[in-house]
Amino acid sequence: MLRFDNAPKKATNLTLNSKVLEMARDLGMNVSQTVDQLLAQEVKRRYWEKWNEDNQEGIAAYNARIAKEGLPLAKYRTF
């Protein structure tokens, strides 16, 4: 699981649309916090997308084995 909790903050420069930035400030938004949260979501999404692509062969092999042999320990299921 990807976790970014309690990671130290690092100052950076961003170029943002001035009108959007002005409206965000007028709405009382914490721009740094909002960008940090949205960037973390996008990083997680892309990480798992890449992980799925990188492991596609193994996932396909596992699914084929389950389709052929069934789930391990399935005989012990009570549902």
Image (spheres, rainbow, N blue to C red):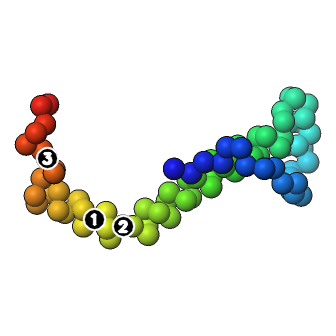
Q: Residue at x 62, y 55 (%)?
A: 43
> Which amino acid type is shown beneath numbered disc 2?
Gln
Out of 66 and 22, give the one closest to the viewer: 66
Q: Secondary structure at mark 1?
A: helix
Residue 73's label in the rendered image is: 3
Out of 7 and 27, give the one closest to the viewer: 7
Q: Are marks 2 and 1 in contact (CB under 8 Å)?
A: yes
Image spot of residue 13 (x, y percent) = 89, 58
Q: Secondary structure at mark 3?
A: loop
Work out which residue is located at the far left of the displayed protein and give it: 75
Quarter holding residue 21: top right
Out of 42 and 8, give the one closest to the viewer: 8
Which is in the foreground here, disc 3 or disc 1? 3
Q: Is residue 15 among the parts visible in the rendering?
A: no
> Which amino acid type is shown beneath numbered disc 3?
Leu
Which is in the foreground here, disc 3 or disc 2? 3
Image spot of residue 19 (x, y percent) = 89, 44
| Count of numbered circles in the view | 3
Q: CA distance from mark 3 to mark 1?
A: 20 Å
Q: Is residue 43 among the parts visible in the rendering?
A: yes
Image spot of residue 47 (x, y percent) = 55, 59
Q: In the picture, which quadrant includes the C terminus?
A: top left
> Which residue in the protein does label 1 denote?
60
Q: Residue at x 91, y 31 (%)?
A: 26
Q: Are marks 3 and 1 in contact (CB under 8 Å)?
A: no
**Mark 3 surroundings: few (<14), some (14-19) or many (≥20) residues within 10 A:** few
Q: Are marks 3 and 2 in contact (CB under 8 Å)?
A: no
**Mark 1 surroundings: few (<14), some (14-19) or many (≥20) residues within 10 A:** few
Q: CA distance from mark 2 to mark 1?
A: 6 Å
> Which residue in the protein does label 2 denote?
56
16 versus 53 height, above or below:
above
Q: Left of 36 or right of it: where is 60?
A: left
